[in-house]
Amino acid sequence: MNVVFRSSPVIDPYTFESVGSGWEQDRVTRPSGYPFYHYLQTEQGSGKIKTAAGTYILKKNEGLLIAPFIRHSYDSSEAVWRVKFATFTGTAERSIPQIMGSRPVIPVNAGQGTQIARLIDDSLELYSRRPLDRKQLSVNCYAVLVNIADTAHAGSPADEPLYQNYVLPVIKEIERDYSLPLTIADLSRKVFITPQYLTRLFRRYLNCSAYEYLTSYRLSKAKELLITSPRLEIQDIARRTGFTDSSHFIAVFKKAVGTTPLDFRRMN
């Protein structure tokens, strides 16, 4: 087993929050998801992963990327399930949803998984060397994401008119004005449909509601500020990311991430 967890500040565009191989995977249940994009790939045996987007069986070299805060659980389908894994962060973390076509879950076939496995093994080898080659690790991390994205863009919803006309404009509005007091009613009016229909479209294409997407995006920006602006007060971060007040921000953050904003900052 070879496992590395990040212990240094986030200063590169893309870097591994954690990465490993030979990990004997136990049963995991995360009703509120995980705060980072994370990838799991079978080395030995097989495993079953249940997500809000469906259920997947991962055989040898097959993998699955799961977006932050997507409900999921997984468990071995055989006596032993060994996996490679990687979780992703970096100063350019907010670009990962665009790289992945905003898909909440991305299955990876065995052919693509073989290439990703090599990149993970190369990265683990780099971690064992001194001095640490951070630049090459960042390149490797980005290469893993790009290999996953090659799968993501096959049959992308971006080609469908409903996505182009209604979902994509709302995503852009959220990314531009997330700090403002946006509501789903406001967003639906901008594309001339009802809030209920907007939510149905988000669930169809992104497997989450429009409100869940807005909240997830605000939380990702809050995490970025917590790490990159250590002197910024919690109430200022809440205000800058569109939460009504610091108490509401802390409650939402803790429910989604499993820890308070201050504890998250200390851990990172």
Image: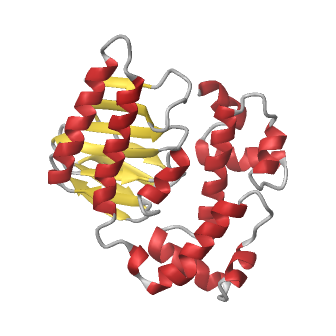
Quadrant in which the N terminus appears: top left
Query: In the picture provided, is 90 more to the left or to the right than 185?
Result: left
At a point 72% along the width and 62% down the height, the residue shown is: 177
Counting from the top left corner in percent of width and height, residue 35 is at: 53, 44
Q: Is residue 241 visible?
A: yes
Quadrant of the rendered image containing residue 223: top right
Image position of 69 with respect to 45: above or below: below
Query: In the picture provided, is 177 more to the left or to the right than 10?
Result: right
Q: Is residue 23 visible?
A: no
Name the foreground residue: 164 vs 51: 164
Counting from the top left corner in percent of width and height, residue 208 is at: 53, 67
Counting from the top left corner in percent of width and height, residue 26 is at: 32, 37
Quadrant of the rendered image containing residue 14: top left
Quadrant of the rendered image containing residue 25: top left
Image position of 9 with respect to 115: above or below: above
Q: How is the image coloured?
A: secondary structure
Image position of 9 with respect to 107: above or below: above
Give the number of marks.
Answer: 0
Counting from the top left corner in percent of width and height, residue 117 is at: 21, 39
At a point 60% along the width and 56% down the height, the residue shown is: 216
Quadrant in which the C terminus appears: top right
Image position of 101 with respect to 258: above or below: below
Query: In the picture provided, is 186 more to the left or to the right than 84?
Result: right
Query: In the picture provided, is 16 more to the left or to the right than 63?
Result: right
At a point 69% along the width and 39% down the height, the residue shown is: 225
Determine the residue located farthest toward the top in the rendered image.
130
